[in-house]
Amino acid sequence: MGIRTALWEKWIDFKYSWGRITASAVISPLLYLIAFGFGLGSYADVDARPYIEFLVPGIIALSSMNTGYSSVAMTLNTQRLYEHSFDQIMISPTPLWQYIIGQAIGGALRGLYISVIVLILSFIFGVTLHLNMMFFAVIIINGMVFSSLGVLAAIIAKTHMDVSRFSTFVITPMTFLCNTFFSLDKLPAVLKTIISLLPLSCTSSILRSISYGEPFKAIELFVLIIYLAVFLGAAYLYTLKKKKI
């Protein structure tokens, strides 16, 4: 019931705002493709491949992260602080853990939607990638990781600006550092180890390996699943705490 409630809410929001949602979510990846992939990228190769082939999996990972986080954090925070519609969920018999999982799945599906659009754009631009079901499964898992982080941020935030600040200090650094626009190989060893263990780094690495037609590191998928479990658990505990208050 809780999962269905959250998914239905996301579907209604998407149904009546899909044009604005699509345009706002696609503009950044499109600019990255043009500026970095076909601008700066025309002068460089990575791992003996055109830079654009290195870039696209990173942009897809980035798109699922941004869309998953923002589609949940901003909406849920507004519902909690201003509309107070979240209070109805809190006092209803809807199991909170189901509602949180539903929010994570809904955000992940929206992230998958935007990622597919980015893939289509990259194909139009002539980029060739190897795709399989695991590629899309990892996108969904990544979307759920950051959607559950969005739930956590929305519950913890005391004002709407706190969600934006959280994005500034957490989401934005990962955007530029986590194996999306450049390889981590030339970073200092300690810094490389820390960044490579962040969820977006793991997702970018897995998607890139699959798109190259190479096996990915199972440990990176395991780390991604651990993040998902931790963020879901933390979101549930904080929401439960708010309910008791």
Image (cartoon, helix red, strand yellow):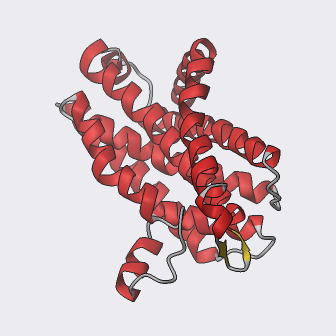
Identified at 83% across, 59% down, the residue is 128
Identified at 44% across, 31% down, the residue is 95
Residue 197 against residue 174 in the figure, above or below: below
Location of residue 205 by image quarter: bottom right
Residue 183 against residue 148 in the figure, above or below: below
In this rendering, the count of numbered labels is 0
- The quadrant of the image that shows the C terminus is top left
Of residues 49 and 142, the one nearer the viewer is: 49
Of residues 111 and 238, the one nearer the viewer is: 111
**Whole-percent x and y of residue 30?**
62, 41
Side (left or right) of 202 relative to 139: left
- The quadrant of the image that shows the N terminus is top right
**Whole-percent x and y of residue 53?**
72, 63
> Is residue 52 in view from this perspective?
yes
Identified at 60% across, 35% down, the residue is 26
Q: Residue furthest bottom?
A: 189
Identified at 63% across, 15% down, the residue is 15
**Whole-percent x and y of residue 138?**
65, 56
Location of residue 162 by image quarter: top left
Of residues 123 and 231, the one nearer the viewer is: 123
